Amino acid sequence: MKKPEPEIIPKKENAYKGFHYTVTDEQIKQHQARSIKEIFDWLQKTNKFIYAVQTPEERLRMKRAKNE
């Protein structure tokens, strides 16, 4: 029998919040100079980092968000 999935409730302190950042023209030029392999390596490292710092509940929330 399949175990029921826990209900995921967003943190109240994060309601209606987003994030932003600025990118300089120099940073854009540096990124454009990267090879496809360098970009994919960077993406893979970023994904591994995010997975390492996520709780199981956060992973489930992200999985559900991707499937919707």
Image (spheres, rainbow, N blue to C red):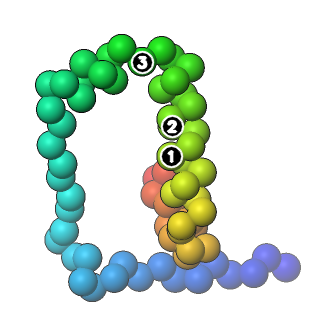
State which quarter of the image contains the N terminus: bottom right
**Percent x, y of residue 43:** 51, 37
Residue lying at 75% horizontally and 81% vertically, measured from the top left: 3
Rounded to the nearest angstrom, the CA distance separating label 3 from label 1 is 16 Å
| 3 or 1: tag closer to the N-terminus | 3
Q: Is residue 64 visible?
A: no
Q: Which residue is mark 3?
A: 34
Q: Is residue 21 above or below residue 44?
A: below
Amino acid of disc 1: Thr
Badge 3: residue crowd in 10 Å (few <14, some 14–19, many ≥20): few
Badge 2: residue crowd in 10 Å (few <14, some 14–19, many ≥20): few
Q: Nearer the viewer, mark 2 or mark 3?
A: 3
Q: Seen in the image, is 10 located left or right of residue 22?
A: right
**Percent x, y of residue 31:** 33, 23
Rounded to the nearest angstrom, the CA distance separating label 2 from label 3 is 12 Å
Residue lying at 51% horizontally and 57% vertically, measured from the top left: 50
Q: Which residue is mark 1?
A: 46
Quadrant position of residue 5:
bottom right
Marks 2 and 1: CB-CB under 8 Å?
yes
Q: Seen in the image, is 56 located left or right of residue 68?
A: right
Is 26 or 14 nearer to us in this picture?
26
Q: Indicate the secondary structure of the residue bearing disc 3.
A: loop
Q: Which residue is mark 2?
A: 43
